[in-house]
Image (spheres, rainbow, N blue to C red):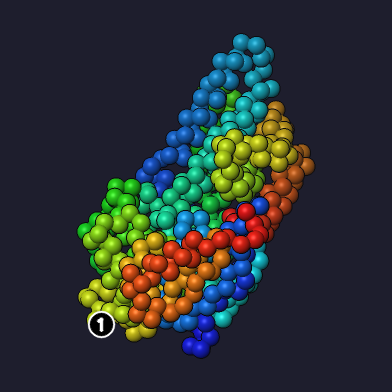
Amino acid sequence: MSESDTPMIEVRNLIKSFGSKHALRGVSLRVMPGESLVIFGPNGAGKSTLVRILSSLSRPTGGTVRIGGLDLARHADGIRRYLGVVSHAPLLYDSLTAEENLSFFAGLYGMQKPEERIKAMLQRVGLYGRRGDLVRTFSRGMVQRLAIARALLHDPEVLLLDEPDTGLDPQAAEMLHGLLSELSGRAAQAPSGSPAGAAIERPRTIVTVTHSIERGLAIADRIAILVNGRVAHDAPVGGMTAAEFRPRYDECCARPRGGGGR
Amino acid sequence: MNFWKAVFAIIRKDIRAELRTKDIFSSMFVFALLAVIVFNFSFELRVPDMKMVVPGIVWVAVTFAGTLGLNRAFVIEQDKGSLAGLLLAPVDRAAIYFGKMLGNLVFIFIVEIILLPLVMIFFNLSLLTWQHLLALFLGTYGFAAVGTVFSAIAVNTRAREVMLPILLFPVLLPVLVAGVKLTGALLDGEPLSELLNWIQLIVVYDLGFTVVAYLTFGFVVEE
């Protein structure tokens, strides 16, 4: 999608306001191709808003977003092909089966003969045996697993994950963690039924929003802390442990908010 | 993905889901049927000629039942975040609009096709002619074209069930008036060739609002 020395995601001075409420107040970030950025921050810091803007679901009030070197405001339709998004909401249809959901989205992404890929993804998230069941009969964790399969179905270059382990039981969270490790190029060897052979060949660019410091650090190349709509910390992980990171996180969250906005 | 492939994929998905749940169809049909029954009992004893009131009854039943269907169509998309799933796909926003609009049109038109024979039985009038169906189709298209955009707006508001009719009905007036006039004139036996003004009005309305919706739907569904 882009040259390797160009950032895959470049956010400059991003502002998002909802009336008088300022969700983002000048966020700037760069994520290089194949890099995994994990964003931490307290509730209401603007993390989900940032992911919604990056995924083209929300228009920024100010600032620019470039993905793969292209301006998101002008090339959103083209850029969406390269994005896989997992959010709090499952983005699935209750009245369709797991297989029908994936088949529908495969069609929208223009995938030719997606049957094998759908089968592989359902196997990977452990839902192949339930492929013919309506999504409304699934537990929250199963729905989230299917949502992950939907996001990875078209083998996207960029993954945007907003608290992807919401509702997952420890086993499913482990599965997701393994999947993300594979996609970020950390896993030594791909298990059978891997989301895609190609996924292991080239690490994906991943932006993850999470509250779980341990899990976040395990998949991060870089970490950012968003507080009150601003980037309070942005640096490579550099082998930092959760115990070392936690005081820094607490310090960022405790800093005075500064002027402007609410 | 090809524009029309995306449109038909969305229509197929909506029809498949509706065949399973019958959520939209059953609520629309029951409401339309009840409206016709209530009007039948209300007017039967005091109106000398049912041709005077049947056009209004048909269009009121269709409008309210259709509004109910439009509300349901987007609530289903919004509640599970599936509309966001659609918006994340690399398809033109306008394709999503046409998919949802044509799906709504199919559901409303099917309700009308089933409702018309019942209206004929209740009021002893003939409505199942191609002229009546044409008038109904053109009016329903306008209703679906405008209603789909407004239901996408209303679904994000707090009082969405109330908000949709408040936003929609004033804009719908031209097509409603033309639809009632057309149905009434056809019941009076006037030939279609003498009703071209009303047909032209509905066609211009349909085309105009299709273009407006095509251009604006992307802004409507994004934050």
Q: Secondary structure at mark 1?
A: loop
Residue A51 visible, this angle = no
User: Residue B191's quadrant in the figure?
Assistant: top right
Examine the rendered structure and indicate whether residue B160 appears above or below residue A68: above
In-front residue for pair A109/B16: A109
In screen coordinates, is A40 left or right of A66? Answer: left
Examine the rendered structure and indicate whether residue B146 appears above or below residue A195: above
Q: Position of residue A7 (x, y in %)?
A: 52, 82
Disc count in the image? 1
Q: Position of residue A163 (x, y in %)?
A: 40, 61
Residue drawn at x 38%, y 81% as measured from the top left: A238
| Badge 1 density bin: few <14, some 14–19, many ≥20, Cα 10 Å | few
List the residue tagged with mark 1: A188
In screen coordinates, is B177 left or right of A130? Answer: right
Examine the rendered structure and indicate whether residue B20 appears above or below residue B53: below
Residue that protrudes farthest toward the top in the picture: B45
In screen coordinates, is A200 left or right of A129? Answer: right
Residue drawn at x 40%, y 48% as measured from the top left: B17
Question: Chain ID for label 1?
Answer: A
Q: Position of residue B193 (x, y in %)?
A: 74, 41
User: Residue A25's quadrant in the figure?
Assistant: bottom right
The quarter of the image holding the C terminus of chain B is bottom right
**Tag 1: residue type?**
Ala
Residue A249 visible, this angle = yes
In-front residue for pair B217/A181: A181
Q: Position of residue A98 (x, y in %)?
A: 32, 57
Residue drawn at x 69%, y 51% as measured from the top left: B209
Residue drawn at x 53%, y 86% as measured from the top left: A6
In-front residue for pair B217/A178: A178
